[in-house]
Amino acid sequence: FIVAYFYRDIFYATGVLMIAMPIGLLLQWAMTRKLNRIYGASTLLVLVLGGFTLAFRNPTFLYWKPTALNWAFAAAFLGSQWIGSKPFVERMLGSAAELKHKQWLKLNQIWVAFFIFVGAVNLYVAYSFSEAFWVKFKLFGMLGITLLFVIIQSIWLTLVAQKNESASGDSEA
């Protein structure tokens, strides 16, 4: 996307993205006979919002794609606290750490807040800065924010798991 954008413009890059993402999805299916739901949802949003971007020659539709995806994740993570036996974050990371149910719920809520935050930051950048800046932010800025979040979350998980372990060790003694 970013190469196509700087080669030509946002509309050309949108078209390239609308072609590349379904091809990636098909390749994934051909190789694994499985589809990643997140990539599938992202592809669907690119096709719909990218289609509007090209049809109306208005990049604002594409600007909303990261926000729509992140806010959909926030809604799904929030809903998972009441639907099913475990919140999404526990389903994803349950094998990496042993936490109490309340701690998984807290971490799940932190993920909800993160997704809401990233979606809001995307809109702030899209409407406050140039298109070129937004394109760079979409790739590098959002990736950086996500990596920082994962690092902080990993530290939190380690500290909480150690605290739980020492608390259970104290009660056994």
Image: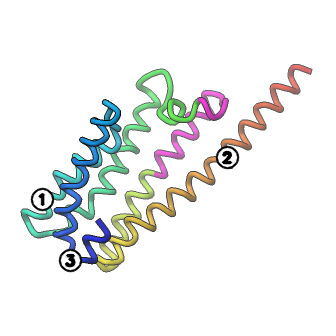
Q: Check disc 1 and give the amino acid type.
A: Phe
Residue under label 2, please give it. Answer: 156
Q: Residue furthest front?
A: 31
Identified at 37% across, 65% down, the residue is 138
| Start-end of magenta stretch | 95-114
Mark found first going from the N terminus, 1 or 3: 3
The Cα–Cα distance between marks 3 and 2, rounded to whole angstroms, is 43 Å
| Residue 151: % across, % down | 62, 53
Mark found first going from the N terminus, 2 or 1: 1
Q: Check disc 2 and give the amino acid type.
A: Trp
Mark found first going from the N terminus, 3 or 2: 3
Which quadrant of the structure image shows residue 107?
A: top right
The Cα–Cα distance between marks 1 and 3, rounded to whole angstroms, is 19 Å
The Cα–Cα distance between marks 2 and 1, rounded to whole angstroms, is 41 Å
Q: Which mark is residue 52?
A: 1
Q: Check disc 1 and report its element: helix, strand or loop.
A: helix
Q: Check disc 3 and give the amino acid type.
A: Arg
Q: Magenta stretch: residue 161 in it?
A: no
Q: Which mark is residue 77?
A: none
Residue under label 3, please give it. Answer: 8
| Residue 119: % across, % down | 38, 57
| Residue 16: % across, % down | 20, 62
Q: Around disc 2, counting alpha carbons within 10 Å, would you say few (fewer than 14), some (14 to 19), or many (20 or more)?
A: few
Badge nearest the viewer, 3 or 2: 3
| Residue 115: % across, % down | 43, 51
Does residue 173 sit above or below 165 in this rendering? above
Identified at 21% across, 67% down, the residue is 60
